[in-house]
Image (cartoon, coloured by chain):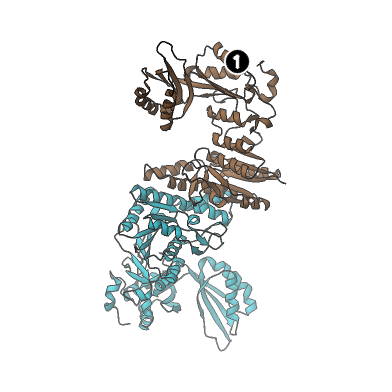
Chain colours: A brown, B cyan
Amino acid sequence: MRKIIVQKFGGTSVADTEKIKNVAKIVIKEKENGNDVVVVVSAMGHTTDYLVKMAKDLTPNPSEREMDMLLSTGEGVSIALLAMAIQAQGYDAVSYNAMQIGIMTENKHSKARIVDIKTDKLRQNLKEGKIIVIAGFQGVTEDGEITTLGRGGSDTSAVALAAALNAERCDIYTDVEGVYTTDPRVVPNASKLKEISYEEMLELAHAGANVLHPRSVETAKLNNVPLRVRSSFKINNLGTLILGVDKMELNNPVAGVAQDLSQARIVVCDVPDKPGVAAKLFSKLANENISVDMIIQSYARKVSNTNDIAFTVDKTDVAKTVSALNLLKEEIGATGQIEVDENISKVSIVGAGMIDRPGVASLMFETLAQQNVNIRMISTSEIKISCLVDKDQSLKAVKALHEAFHLDSNEIADVKGDLPNL
Amino acid sequence: MRKIIVQKFGGTSVADTEKIKNVAKIVIKEKENGNDVVVVVSAMGHTTDYLVKMAKDLTPNPSEREMDMLLSTGEGVSIALLAMAIQAQGYDAVSYNAMQIGIMTENKHSKARIVDIKTDKLRQNLKEGKIIVIAGFQGVTEDGEITTLGRGGSDTSAVALAAALNAERCDIYTDVEGVYTTDPRVVPNASKLKEISYEEMLELAHAGANVLHPRSVETAKLNNVPLRVRSSFKINNLGTLILGVDKMELNNPVAGVAQDLSQARIVVCDVPDKPGVAAKLFSKLANENISVDMIIQSYARKVSNTNDIAFTVDKTDVAKTVSALNLLKEEIGATGQIEVDENISKVSIVGAGMIDRPGVASLMFETLAQQNVNIRMISTSEIKISCLVDKDQSLKAVKALHEAFHLDSNEIADVKGDLPNL
């Protein structure tokens, strides 16, 4: 049986007709490799901005239903043009929007989740030798309402289609060449990873690496669909393969280092040390739709029987958080100040291989100590260690960690033997 | 029961967000009149040209299926924006594309005909007090393929929706103020008709008046839907009502005068006067997809037993016609030349009231004679008389006929008593 490859091209890859011709070549090359090809595309370059601008000309608060109707036209244009470009090269191609396929979503405008994808028509078309071009980012409800999937929606469409079609792989073509050990704009000798696990990718994504939206990685993980992140403009470069830990050739102790400058640290001082206080505090924030990231509660002071609760939130949520806390202070009996520090950075190392290697954490702390970087908070997950540091020490910390874990080699997977004894 | 009014706005009426706001006002005004309102819109201004240009960048011959996919996005934009503009004024509105409604067409890309329109969803929405905004020009096949309706498609969508919903009226908003007795750009004192019959409108359309596409008028006639042609920019002007002859307040002997400069006259000389020759000739042209308009066969000459066959075709078909005739000449035994004259004009008078008034034809011929206009061919239908004249005499002919039939009054319907004794 022929293998199915799902390819996804974002807005910059189809920004004009010349770029669409380039995409057609990549698609045809995969078809010529002997695979069945299903292509998912986003709207062309700045189409979405243009449509949003017109909507805002009409009303400051357009309805989400009509915004979905409006925005979904963007992919209608790019799929038809890409199908034409493929046909112009003598290949059979057909384009479909989400409604025609049956990319079924929940009934929630502007950020719907896919619940089902009909594949009959797709399988029939593939059997007929057709290349199928599908509109990403959009879906349809049972009632025939057009929905959109929110940020990273086209990636999610592609991964969900790959899962529904039991595809061999989902290739995400983008304007970067793959997933790096750290942001190459920050650390120029960052190296491209050959492989990374879903879990590591998720931690890196949450830690501030913007290659893929976490939702699409989660969907891939859930359905065990191998993802490849690669460049639309350097097609001989294989990019980075994202797959299950069990299928990885090698487990690097540390796959990458990330910094996240978007968080602020909040400390509620002198909170009574009694049950239910933390619950009250964080459920209040949850009700206000404020996402809390790292949380640390200090040991209770014996004299006053109080402690401090520190946590981080997104900088854009600081004002909302402080006013919620001020309302709550009396109720929970907090007597101290509420401190806000926006000059912080969360520096994380991520790696599926650190699970059985306690030496990873100590090497991280030692490295930061050698650089005189003060650690303000620490949090850990199975495959990630994050340290909150002062913002102006963040870059120094990232560079030192990148070097300490030997991430600046050309091919991480090949240098495992050279890693320090962890 | 509340009455349903279908309104149609063309591309120039929704060319930018300011114009869309204006359209929203017109829609709301009709709603405030106590009617249920269904609005059909075309793509914004130059959207279609822009989309076609991108397609042509990719391939000189884009597939019709993908062109339909591409072009149908244009109305997706305008319906969503118009719905937002209506909502911004505090009214409930909802937009639908053809697939969501079920505007079912035959499976023929780029010029499909509507075969059925589902109305359940529409009636439910109207019952809920919603203003419905629908994409014109597009349809969907039973297999879920997106089709477009070809030239004048949005007018046809609007009329077909009015018929399906048993609407009180279909208002076609455009950039002209109504249907005139003749082209006001040619004869400045042309007057706007208050009423005109479907049949007259069809003859005027075919005779070169470009207000409505004949297909939409035919659909209106078939379903007895009253049409009103009116201006988007002067909404207090009621425009022209197009309806059945039986429902007209008054039958004017002559409703209008039209000139058509797009035809060429072809004469096949010295054709044998025997049965089957004309049939052979015109079936040959039909096979070549050449539309023939006026046809005249001269009386046979006794001496040679031959005659001349003259007819008119569209100027763009002249080359194709001549080469078809040259291939045919020998077969039918025509010995004379093939003459082509492109310096001609077809001048027509149209009026449902001329049926029982033979004086109308004679007044036309007398008027042209007084102006020294030579009549080259004549053809008549029940409600139209057309004369082929030299192109440089056309304007003089139109003006003289316009005056002779007293069409330059302010309200034609009011001056019936002043018409010459026909």
Q: What is the residue that sits farthest to the bottom in this orientation?
A: B302
Residue shown at 33% from the left, 64% from the top: B239
Q: In which quarter of the image is residue A20?
A: top right
Q: In which quarter of the image is the C terminus of chain B?
A: bottom left
Q: Nearer the viewer, residue B132 or A45?
A: B132
Write down the chain letter for disc 1.
A
Q: Is residue B19 rendered to the left or right of residue A15? A: left
Is residue A90 visible in the rendered image? The answer is no
User: Measured along the vertical axis of the image, is residue B112 above or below residue B19?
Assistant: below
Is residue A211 visible in the rendered image? The answer is yes
Q: Tag 1, which secondary structure? A: helix
From the top left corner, tell me how far across and down residue A227 is, in percent.
63, 36
Residue shown at 37% from the left, 46% from the top: A58
Q: Nearer the viewer, residue A29 or A292?
A: A292
Please give the residue where the numbered disc 1 appears in the rendered image: A363
Q: Is residue B87 rendered to the left or right of residue A216? A: left
Q: How many marks?
A: 1
Residue shown at 63% from the left, 26% from the top: A352
Q: What is the residue that sits farthest to the front in this orientation?
A: A275
From the top left corner, tell me how far across and down residue B317 is, in percent.
54, 67
Q: Quadrant of the N terminus of chain B?
A: bottom left
User: Measured along the vertical axis of the image, is residue A64 above or below residue B3?
Assistant: above
User: Measured along the vertical axis of the image, is residue A155 above or below residue B48?
Assistant: above
Answer few, some or many: residues within 10 Å of disc 1's Cα (few below 14, many 20 plus, some between 14 and 19): some
Q: Quadrant of residue B278?
A: bottom right
From the top left corner, tell me how far across and down residue B171 is, in percent.
37, 62
Query: What amino acid does circle 1 point to?
Result: Leu
